């Protein structure tokens, strides 16, 4: 676990606490330490609180945006106090800086909004047609589960999890990620059909073909056909919170 | 399988056996798909003398070449038989997911013959059939039936077409229901299936269905997508579907109100599609592969009907249980439609039978005592709901109404038949024909009786004189209150509808929005299937089907005198508050002449001429008519 140092970097507006540039507090393990004689604005503190344990994590997942996020702003729109969070190795006391490399952008993912899905299965049909030549959605890499009496239509498709549980669950390394798209791909020669990946998937997005191999979304190589076919944007390919 | 499965499943219930036959090539070349296949089969195998509820009637399921493909709304499935409601041609189709699943199970058509010894449901999976006891679902409603069958078969991708208790109780206008609310409701196909002791047909298919030329198919599909997404009706259809018609027809002054006593409903805005979309709608819903998701899922959050949630309703149910019966409370209309769906009945016929009774009650032909003590005053929604249940279980006064409005009028007597709003024993829809002359003609001549879906001449709303002249030789043809050219308009749209029903694609797309012109349809079929069609051949197929259906109903005793409308529409003008439609009646005869002329049917008898039948390669049926 990292330690953190949260420093007031800039006061863009008017802070009446007042916080001053250079004021700071530290997060050491499970404790918050405020330097003797100093204080911390409770409103700014409470707004950044949930984020601090996340920043302490040492795991380095793929597609993880947290290491790159270093600045938070006080929620008072007049205050605009900018805090910088420094990640510190507790043993060496060195500040860990994670620089974003050229082209190292957050990868797009398959985003699903069940509340919009009409249940039409156009996504299944086009997926199957593109991958197998058959319109029948049986072997489509996206499946719509329907609970008709409740009006529920649940698209089941791979979401490209950072720490993909399916890959971890596979005893034979038959699953791997495409380095470009991060789609989970299957090495069918290695797969023994144990279905551990199916059980591990938190979204129920893996199902098995008649020849007992897992069927997982390959993102059509980076331009998913199902997304283009969906008439209500229940499926999108991009980053949550951003327009594509 | 390229577009077609080329296989027909024939099920014999009497000895629980089945055979698989090749689909004759003649079927494909001359009848194209679903409705065409079924009409040909019905014509050849079910003689007009057959008892519709006896073992010699056949229950026929048909799908078309586009069923199950990526074409938007390629979801429809036709159920056909001789109708117990009209004693004539029976045919009804539904959307949802059943049709495509049948294709994936490897069949273009299923023929169900004979009668099971005890209540059964049939399960078709990839060209294999099993018969299952349905004792535990006997009398269960449509929703429960589907739930139990899916549980028993342990596969939630199974598609179920079932009948509800209404069909099992012999209600003549009971339908076959897919995906809970996707109703093939008209002409009593549910009653036919139930008469064979069949509660449901379940289907599951995982077979490959391919396109002969996938790239070409996708190229044409892209063109279709462009036409769909840029269509001026697209956004409205996506928001409201057919429920948009409550407001639109009320504005036009021809919304069926209090059993067609007027065309304007004072509470129309409170029961409109717009209101529904703003309040109870939770999300859009779509049939198989459809990019125009026009259906809706709604939920009532509070009040008397708290917790009621379902997909739907469509315009016919919404208006049928609001304006037609004078009810201005949308929640009770939703409840009424939900009851009809669960019992498995046709909302048009039910709403006609109830509004017919309400009018008789108003003018004193029937009394509270006749109606089991129900107060049938306009707008009494509790009575409407109770009557729906009474009909479904044929209890008391419900039994009088359960055979359709014609039989109800016969039983009630006292000159009540003039209030029965039907054509050829099939109850008519929720638009007042007086304000829509093309629809009036379409309903009068429709092969399955009082039905607007055999033609849907929505062109008459366009008000585009130039297009009217260009397409139908008369500017008037583009205006709903005009007559000239309507015979040709109806002919054209009957053929568009036949095309839709043969491809088994939604009529909203093919007929109303006029997506996929004949020429493009031919291109698409040539890319999809191993057969070659031209634009002219497709038009001829559509015309052939209309003529074959006409021949069937002629054999059932239908002539020109039956191509008419209830007296009210011909004689009583719409009241003065009906806007532009005020003062209108339907002058049918001139339109009929024009229609027969464009069809080349005999003006006096309404029978297709020998010349026309020969032109359409229907030589083999001439002997049946002459």
Image: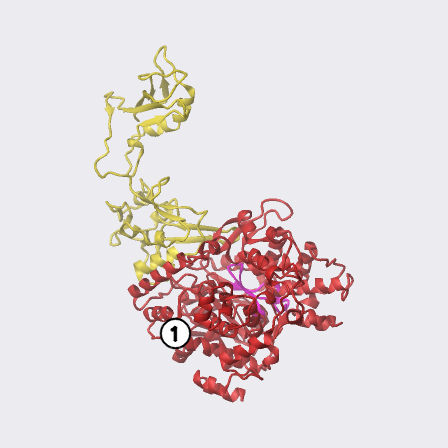
Chain colours: A yellow, B red
Pinpoint residue A130: horizontal percent, then vertical percent: 31, 59
Which residue carries the number 1 mark? Answer: B6
Residue B54 visible within the image: no
Q: Is residue B553 left or right of residue A203?
A: right
Q: Is residue B254 above or below residue B41?
A: above
Which of these two is toward me, B60 or B474?
B474
Magenta residue check for B452: no
Q: Is residue A89 above or below residue A59?
A: above
Pinpoint residue A92: horizontal percent, then vertical percent: 23, 21
Residue at 58% across, 45% down: B301
Q: Is residue B575 left or right of residue B290?
A: right
Q: Is residue B617 left or right of residue A1?
A: right
In the rendered image, the residue lying farthest to the left is A102
Q: How many marks can you see?
A: 1
Pinpoint residue A75: horizontal percent, then vertical percent: 41, 26
Q: Quadrant of the C terminus of chain B?
A: bottom right
Which of these two is toward me, B554 or B595?
B595
Displayed quadrant of residue B518:
bottom left
How busy is the neighbourhood of tag 1: few (under 14 within 10 Å), some, or many (20 plus)?
Answer: some
Q: Quadrant of the N terminus of chain B?
A: bottom left
Which of these two is toward me, A169 or B452?
B452
Which of these two is toward me, A210 or B75?
B75
Displayed quadrant of residue A143:
bottom left
Pinpoint residue A169: horizontal percent, then vertical percent: 32, 44
Residue A151 visible within the image: yes
Q: Is residue B52 left or right of residue A109?
A: right
What subunit carries mark 1? B
Boundaries of the magenta span: B161-189
Q: Which structural element holds mark 1?
A: loop
């Amino acid at each position: 676990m990292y330690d953190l140092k949260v420093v007031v970097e800039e006061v863009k507006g008017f802070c009446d606490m007042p916080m001053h540039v250079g004021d700071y507090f530290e997060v050491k393990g499970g404790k918050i330490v405020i330097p003797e004689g100093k204080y911390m604005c409770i409103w700014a503190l409470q707004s950044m609180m949930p984020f601090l344990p996340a920043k302490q994590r040492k795991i380095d997942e793929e597609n993880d945006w947290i290491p790159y996020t270093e600045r938070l702003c006080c929620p008072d729109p007049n205050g605009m106090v900018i805090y910088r969070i420094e990640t510190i190795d507790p043993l060496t006391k060195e500040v860990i800086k994670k620089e974003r490399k050229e082209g190292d952008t957050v990868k797009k993912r398959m985003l699903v909004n069940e509340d919009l899905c009409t249940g039409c299965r156009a996504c299944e049909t086009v997926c199957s047609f593109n991958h197998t030549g058959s319109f029948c959605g049986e072997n489509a890499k996206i499946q719509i589960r329907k609970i008709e009496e409740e009006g529920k239509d649940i698209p089941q498709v791979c979401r490209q999890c950072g720490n993909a549980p399916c890959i971890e669950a596979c005893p034979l390394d038959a699953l791997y990620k495409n380095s470009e798209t991060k789609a989970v791909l299957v090495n069918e020669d290695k797969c023994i059909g144990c279905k551990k990946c199916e059980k591990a998937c938190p979204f129920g997005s893996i199902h098995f073909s008649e020849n007992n191999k897992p069927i997982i979304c390959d993102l059509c190589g980076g331009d998913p056909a199902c997304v283009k076919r969906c008439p209500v944007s229940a499926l999108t390919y991009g980053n949550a919170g951003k327009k594509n | 399988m390229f577009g077609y499965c080329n296989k027909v499943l024939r099920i014999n219930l009497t000895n629980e056996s089945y055979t698989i036959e090749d689909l004759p090539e003649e079927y494909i070349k001359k009848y194209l798909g679903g409705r065409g296949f079924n009409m040909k089969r019905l014509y050849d195998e079910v003689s007009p003398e057959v008892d519709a509820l006896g073992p010699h009637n056949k229950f026929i399921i048909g799908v078309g070449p586009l069923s199950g493909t990526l074409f938007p709304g390629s979801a429809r499935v036709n159920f056909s038989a001789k109708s117990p409601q009209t004693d004539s041609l029976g045919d009804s189709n539904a959307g949802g997911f059943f049709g495509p699943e049948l294709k994936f199970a490897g069949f273009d058509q299923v023929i169900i013959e004979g009668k099971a010894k005890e209540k059964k449901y049939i399960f078709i999976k990839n060209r294999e059939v099993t018969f299952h006891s349905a004792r535990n679902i006997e009398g269960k409603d449509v929703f429960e039936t589907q739930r139990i069958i899916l549980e028993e078969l342990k596969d939630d991708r199974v598609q179920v077409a079932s009948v509800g208790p209404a069909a099992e109780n012999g209600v003549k206008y009971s339908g076959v229901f897919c995906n809970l609310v996707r109703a093939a409701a008209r002409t009593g196909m549910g009653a036919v299936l139930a008469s064979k002791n069949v509660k449901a047909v379940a289907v599951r298919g995982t077979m490959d269905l391919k396109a002969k030329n996938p790239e070409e198919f996708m190229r044409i599909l892209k063109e279709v997508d462009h036409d769909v997404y840029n269509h001026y009706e697209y956004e409205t259809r996506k928001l409201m579907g057919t429920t948009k018609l409550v407001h639109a027809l009320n504005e036009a002054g021809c919304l069926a109100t209090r059993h067609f006593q007027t065309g304007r409903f004072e509470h129309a805005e409170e029961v409109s599609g717009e209101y529904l979309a703003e309040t109870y709608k939770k999300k859009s819903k779509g049939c198989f592969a459809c990019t125009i998701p026009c259906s809706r899922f709604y939920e009532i959050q509070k009040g008397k009907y708290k917790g009621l949630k379902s997909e739907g309703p469509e315009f016919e149910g919404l208006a049928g249980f609001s304006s037609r019966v004078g009810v201005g409370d949308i929640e009770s209309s939703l409840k009424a439609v939900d009851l009809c769906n669960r019992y498995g009945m046709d909302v048009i016929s039910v709403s006609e039978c109830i509004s017919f009774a309400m009018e008789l009650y108003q003018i004193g032909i029937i009394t509270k005592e006749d109606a089991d003590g129900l107060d049938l005053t306009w707008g009494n929604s509790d009575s409407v709901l109770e009557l729906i249940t009474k009909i479904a279980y044929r209890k008391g006064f419900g039994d009088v109404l359960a055979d359709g409005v014609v039989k109800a009028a016969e039983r009630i007597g006292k000159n009540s038949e003039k209030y029965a709003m039907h054509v050829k024993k099939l109850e008519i829809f929720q638009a007042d024909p007086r304000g829509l002359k093309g629809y009036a003609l379409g309903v009068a001549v429709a092969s399955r009786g009082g039905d607007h879906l055999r033609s849907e001449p929505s062109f008459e709303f366009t008000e585009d004189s130039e297009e009217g002249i260009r397409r139908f030789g008369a500017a008037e043809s583009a205006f709903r209150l005009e007559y000239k050219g309507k015979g040709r308009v109806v002919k054209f749209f009957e053929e568009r509808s036949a095309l839709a029903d043969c491809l088994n694609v939604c009529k909203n797309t093919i007929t109303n929005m006029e997506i996929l012109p004949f020429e493009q349809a031919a291109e698409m079929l040539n890319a999809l299937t191993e057969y070659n069609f031209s634009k002219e051949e497709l038009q001829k197929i559509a015309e052939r089907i209309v003529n074959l259906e006409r021949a069937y109903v002629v054999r059932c005793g239908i002539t020109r005198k039956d191509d008419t409308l209830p007296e009210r529409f011909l004689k009583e003008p719409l009241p003065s508050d009906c806007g532009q439609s005020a003062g209108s009646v339907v002058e049918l005869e001139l339109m009929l002449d024009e229609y027969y002329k464009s069809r080349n049917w005999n003006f006096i008898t309404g029978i297709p001429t020998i010349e026309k039948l020969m032109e359409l390669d229907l030589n083999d049926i001439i002997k049946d008519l002459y």
